[in-house]
Amino acid sequence: STLSASAQEAGAQSRVSNEQLLELSTGVVRNTVCLHLPFLPQQPLCITVVGNVSVGAEDTDGELRVVFTQFSVGFKDANFGLRIPLPNPVGSLQTTYCDEDFRISRGGRGGIFLLRRLAAEPNIEKKNMTYM
C-alpha cells in the first residue's frame, strides 16, 4: 500500500509539509519534506530521500528494512534539482497499528510516526490509498 506522513504548520509565515510514500509492491520508499517559505510564495523548496524497502525476516514481526539510495533538493514542481547518491544507509520501520484510516509506526531510531490516509482518487481502490 501507499503511505504518507502528516502535514503540519511550522508558524504563521512558513509551512512545512512532510510526506512518506511507501510502496511494498514495488519496493520503493520516498520521504519528502517541503518548506513553504515567505520569500518563495510560488514554489515550496523540497528535500526528498528515496530508497528501497522490503519486509524483514519472520522473526522481526513484519518490520520493514529501508535502504536509502538517493537524496535530492529542488522546487516541488520543477523538473530539475540537485540529486546526490547516498552510501546506502539502512533503517527500519515497525508498524504497531494500521486500519483503513490511520497508521502508527516506530522508526529504527525510536521516532514515532502517526499517519492518516489521504482521500483517494475516484478510480483508486481504498486499499491503495495514500496516508498523509
Image (cartoon, grey):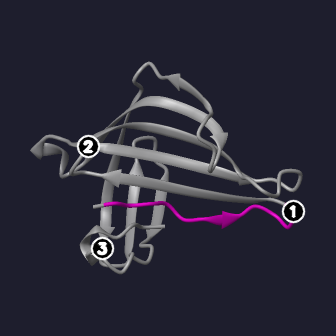
Which residue is more in the foreground, 75 or 85?
75
Q: Which quadrant holds the N terminus?
A: bottom left
First along the sequence among labels 2 and 1: 1
The question of residue 71 being in magenta is answered with: no
How many numbered markers are drawn?
3
- Residue at (44, 18) in percent of width and height: 87
As shown in the figure, which amino acid type bears the numbered disc 1? Answer: Gln
Q: Secondary structure at mark 1?
A: loop
* Rendered location of residue 111, percent (x, y): 49, 50
- In the rendered structure, find residue 27 and report the number of the disc placed on it: 2
Q: CA distance from mark 2 to mark 3?
A: 19 Å
* Rendered location of residue 11, percent (x, y): 81, 64
Q: Secondary structure at mark 3?
A: loop
What is the residue that sits farthest to the front in this orientation?
79
Q: Which residue is mark 1?
A: 13
Which residue is more in the foreground, 45 or 78?
78
Predominant SS along the magenta part: loop
- Over which residues does the magenta segment extend? 2-13
- Relative to residue 43, is residue 22 drawn left or right? left
* Rendered location of residue 53, percent (x, y): 29, 41
Please identify the quarter of the rendering in which residue 90 is found.
Answer: top left
